[in-house]
Image (cartoon, grey):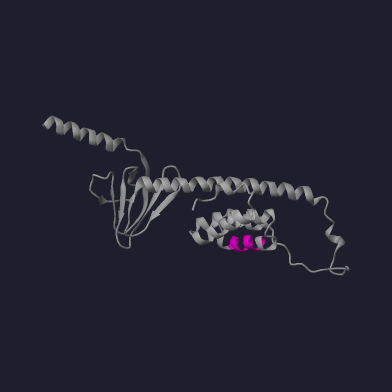
Amino acid sequence: MKRTLFIIALCLLYLGLSAAQVGKIRFILGDVKYKASQNQNYKAASIDLSLVEDGFLLTGPDSSVEVQWLSGGTSTIGSNKQVSIRKLFEEASSKQNWKNRLENKVSNLKLQNKRRASSTAGIRREESDVTRDSLPYWYEEPKQDIDDAIALYEIKQYSRSIPLFEKVIAQAPLKKDAELSHAYLILIYDAIGEKQKLKEHSDVLKRDFPNSTTLDSLPVE
């Protein structure tokens, strides 16, 4: 009997040690507990605690915990929740995949836009041909350059880049710059947690640009 119990204990220990580590705790606020498997008891969690796929996190009232994944990215769990590490990791991986794909598509679109702009610049009229004193002359508001918005996005100045991307869209809603602006705004609103705005731009991108190369990289609803 003792031999049998000893073997079972060794097996449980082996399973616990062999469970795949997928992340660690980066930040804790309040009462947060963790257990490495369904059959174990919860214990107080701590910063830098390694997390395995079979584990669970439990948060109390007014508590939260941030997980840093070994594969990159983070996840945050709010108060009064019990969460499976496996499910949380799968959701984070899925999110990271669409973001990486969309960022790659955006980079390609940006490069295509620059090439197109360079190829057409040589056949445009010289701006000196049309002045305020020329007749006929129609005043147009200066067009918003998408490169200004992209530059702000790249240094994470999201609040400043959003109105510029919106202005690019308003100027020419069906042009390539508008397609690119919608894609950038989707990435921005995901980064700042504005899910409704993210969905709005995803819906418009699908409607106005049904052949866009970005569509297979949008987040799944």
Which residue is drawn at the image coordinates 25% and 50% (left, top)? 43
- Is residue 170 left or right of 156 when viewed as pictured? right
The furthest residue to the right: 135
- Is residue 60 left or right of 119 when viewed as pictured? left
Q: Which residues are magenta?
A: 160-168
Q: Quadrant of residue 9?
A: top left
Residue 164 counted in the magenta span = yes
- Is residue 160 left or right of 7 when viewed as pictured? right
Residue 32 picture location, percent across and down: 30, 55
Residue 121 counted in the magenta span = no
Quarter of the image where the N terminus is located: top left
- Is residue 17 left or right of 91 when viewed as pictured? left
Which residue is drawn at the image coordinates 63% and 58% (left, top)? 149
The answer to whether 3 is drawn above or below residue 151 in the figure is: above
Residue 99 picture location, percent across and down: 52, 48
For the question of whether residue 172 can be seen, the reply is yes
The answer to whether 201 is drawn above or below residue 38 in the figure is: below
Magenta stretch: dominant SS?
A: helix
Q: Closest to the observer: 221 or 145?
A: 221
The answer to whether 17 is drawn above or below residue 29 in the figure is: above
Residue 84 picture location, percent across and down: 34, 48
The furthest residue to the top: 3
For the question of whether residue 194 can be seen, the reply is no
Residue 79 picture location, percent across and down: 34, 60
Q: Closest to the observer: 201 or 109?
A: 201
Q: How many marks?
A: 0
